[in-house]
C-alpha cells in the first residue's frame, strides 16, 4: 500500500515501515561514527521500541556490542493497516542486529504484567544467564497493577490551582492560551501508580529473585525536570509527583541490590519530541523555542545523541559517576544552561502565532514528529507501494 501520514490530534494513525527502518539505521550509523563504548554486555530494555528506550538499545548493541532483550507494547500490522512505529522500529533493529551478528530478542506485551516479567526472566535464563544493565523507559497513560488488578490512568494536570499559559498546536502553528484545571488527590495517586517507580521496583525484585542479575548490575530509569515555565504542568504537576516517586525508588532499589554491589539510578534527559511529550500541553511550544536556541548554539541533540552521551560520558566512564545533589545523572545539562534558558524565556514572552515561525523551530518540531512515524526521511520513496505487513520474530 502507499502509506501517508494520517493525523488525529497528537497522534499519527499510520507509520511507514521503510521510514522507521531508515530512522533506526540512521541511529545505528550515528553510534558507529562515534566509536565503541566499553559498556554493558547483556542488556534488558523495558520500553525498547521508540524514544529513549530504542536509542538506549541501539547504543548498547551497536556501541557496546551488547546482547539485548527488548520489551515493548506495540501493534502488529494487519492487511491494509500499518503497525505502530515501535513495531517497525523493532523489526528493523532486529534485522540490523542479526546482520551484525548481535543477539537481539524482543517481547511484545504489557510490561506492567506479571506474565511479561516471567516471560522475560525465562528468556534471560535460557539465552543470557545474567544481565548487567536494565533500562527502564516506559511511557504509558495507563497501568493495571498486577497485585490489585486496579487499572490506573495518569493525568497531566497542575496541583493546587489552575494553570494558564501559552501552547501551540504544532500542526497548525496556532499559539493560544490554555487553562488546565487543578487535579484531585486521586489524579496524583493514579499518575504515581502509572509513571512512578512501583513497577520499576517490581521488575528489579523479580529479576533479583530469579537470580538473573550480575554482580555490579546497573539499572537506569529516565526522568525530566525542565524550566520554571513548564513547572506547574510538569515537574510540580501530577507527572512531576510520579517522577519524584521514580527518583526516590532508585534509592530503594539500590539498597536492595547491595549484596550484588548493584545500583539503580535516574538519568534526567532533555526535552525531546516523542509520542509521550507531544501530548503534554505547553511543552511543544517550549520545545520549539528550545530547539531553535540549542540549534543556534550548536548543542542540539536527539534521542540517540543523548543516549550515546549518557552511556559514554556518564555511565561507562570507568570512573565514579557524576551526579547532582539528588543523586541523579544529568544529560539535560545543555538544555538547562542558564544562557539557553534565558534565551528561551525571552522568546517565550514574544511567542505568538505570527512570531513563532520566525523565533521558534516549529519546522524542526513537525519534522521530528513526522520522523517518529517514519515519515520525512531522505532516500525513502513515499509514493511507492510498500508492504505494510512486516513480520517480526518475537520471543
Ligand atoms: P516513548 O513513548 O517514545 O516510548 C515508550 C516506550 O514504552 C515504547 O517502547 C512503548 O512500547 C513502551 N510501553 C508503553 N507502555 C507499555 C506497556 N504497558 N508495556 C510494555 N511497553 C510499554 O517515550 P519516551 O519519551 O522515550 O519516554 C521514555 C521515558 O523517558 C519516560 O519515563 C519519560 O518520562 C522519560 N523522558 C522523556 C522526555 C521527553 O522529552 N520525551 C524527557 C526526559 C525523560
Image: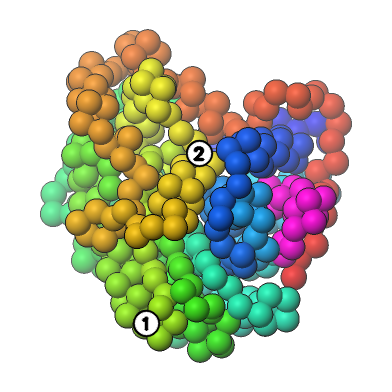
Q: Secondary structure at mark 1?
A: helix
Q: Is residue 345 left or right of residue 283?
A: left
Q: Secondary structure at mark 2?
A: helix
Residue 100 in the magenta stretch? The answer is yes
The N terminus: image quadrant: top right
Q: Is residue 153 visible?
A: no
Q: Earlier in the sequence, mark 2 or mark 1?
A: 1
Q: Residue at x 44, y 53 (%)?
A: 317
Where is residue 179 shown, x and y percent of the image? 23, 38
Closer to us: 228 or 387: 228
The residue lying furthest to the front in this view is 318
Where is residue 363 shown, x and y percent of the image? 49, 20
Q: Is residue 202 above or below residue 301?
A: below
Q: Is residue 327 above or below residue 357?
A: below
Residue 51 in the magenta stretch? The answer is no
Q: Residue at x 73, y 81 (%)?
A: 126
Residue beneath disc 2: 305
Q: Main secondary structure of the magenta part?
A: helix
What stretch of residues is rendered in magenta?
89-105
Residue beneath disc 1: 258
Q: Is residue 224 above or below residue 203?
A: above
Q: Is residue 157 visible?
A: yes
Q: Nearer the viewer, mark 2 or mark 1?
A: 1
Q: Is residue 293 left or right of residue 43?
A: left
Q: Dot 2: within a 10 Å radius of its alpha carbon, few (fewer than 14), some, or many (20 or more) residues?
A: some
Amino acid at each position: 500500500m502507499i502509506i501517508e501520514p494520517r493525523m488525529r490530534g497528537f497522534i499519527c494513525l499510520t507509520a511507514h515501515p521503510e521510514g522507521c527502518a531508515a530512522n533506526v539505521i540512521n541511529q545505528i550509523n550515528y553510534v558507529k561514527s562515534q566509536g565503541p563504548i566499553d559498556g554493558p554486555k547483556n542488556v534488558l530494555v523495558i520500553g525498547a521500541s521508540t524514544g529513549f528506550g530504542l536509542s538506549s538499545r541501539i547504543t548498547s548493541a551497536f556501541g557496546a556490542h551488547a546482547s539485548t532483550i527488548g520489551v515493548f507494547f506495540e501493534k502488529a500490522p494487519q492487511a491494509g493497516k500499518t503497525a505502530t512505529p515501535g513495531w517497525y522500529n523493532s523489526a528493523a533493529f532486529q534485522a540490523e542486529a542479526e546482520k551484525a551478528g548481535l543477539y537481539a530478542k524482543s517481547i511484545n506485551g504489557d510490561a506492567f504484567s506479571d506474565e511479561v516479567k516471567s516471560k522475560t526472566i525465562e528468556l534471560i535464563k535460557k539465552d543470557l544467564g545474567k544481565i548487567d544493565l536494565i533500562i527502564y523507559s516506559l511511557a504509558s497513560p495507563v497501568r493495571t497493577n498486577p497485585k490489585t488488578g486496579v487499572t490506573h490512568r495518569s493525568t497531566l494536570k497542575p496541583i493546587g490551582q489552575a494553570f494558564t499559559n501559552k501552547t501551540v498546536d504544532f500542526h497548525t502553528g496556532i499559539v493560544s492560551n490554555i487553562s488546565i484545571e487543578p487535579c484531585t488527590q486521586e489524579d496524583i495517586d493514579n499518575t504515581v501508580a502509572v509513571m512512578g517507580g512501583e513497577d520499576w521496583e517490581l521488575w528489579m525484585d523479580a529479576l533479583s529473585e530469579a537470580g538473573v542479575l550480575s554482580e555490579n548490575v546497573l539499572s537506569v530509569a529516565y526522568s525530566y525536570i525542565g524550566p520554571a515555565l513548564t513547572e506547574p504542568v510538569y515537574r510540580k504537576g501530577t507527572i512531576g509527583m510520579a517522577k519524584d516517586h521514580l527518583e526516590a525508588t532508585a534509592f530503594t532499589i539500590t539498597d536492595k541490590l547491595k549484596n550484588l554491589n548493584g545500583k539503580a539510578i535516574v538519568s534526567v534527559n532533555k526535552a525531546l519530541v516523542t509520542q509521550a511529550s507531544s501530548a503534554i500541553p505547553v511543552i511543544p511550544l517550549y520545545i520549539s523555542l528550545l530547539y531553535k536556541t540549542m540549534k543556534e548554539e550548536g548543542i542540539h541533540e536527539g534521542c540517540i545523541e543523548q543516549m550515546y552521551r549518557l552511556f559514554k560520558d556518564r555511565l561507562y566512564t570507568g570512573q565514579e559517576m557524576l551526579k547532582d545533589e539528588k543523586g541523579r545523572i544529568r544529560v539535560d545539562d545543555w538544555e538547562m544552561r542558564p544562557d539557553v534558558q534565558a534565551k528561551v524565556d525571552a522568546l517565550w514572552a514574544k511567542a505568538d502565532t505570527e512570531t513563532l515561525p520566525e523565533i521558534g523551530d516549529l519546522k524542526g518540531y513537525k519534522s521530528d514528529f513526522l520522523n517518529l512515524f517514519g515519515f520525512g526521511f531522505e532516500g525513502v520513496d513515499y509514493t511507492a507501494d510498500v508492504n505494510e505487513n512486516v513480520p517480526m520474530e518475537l520471543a
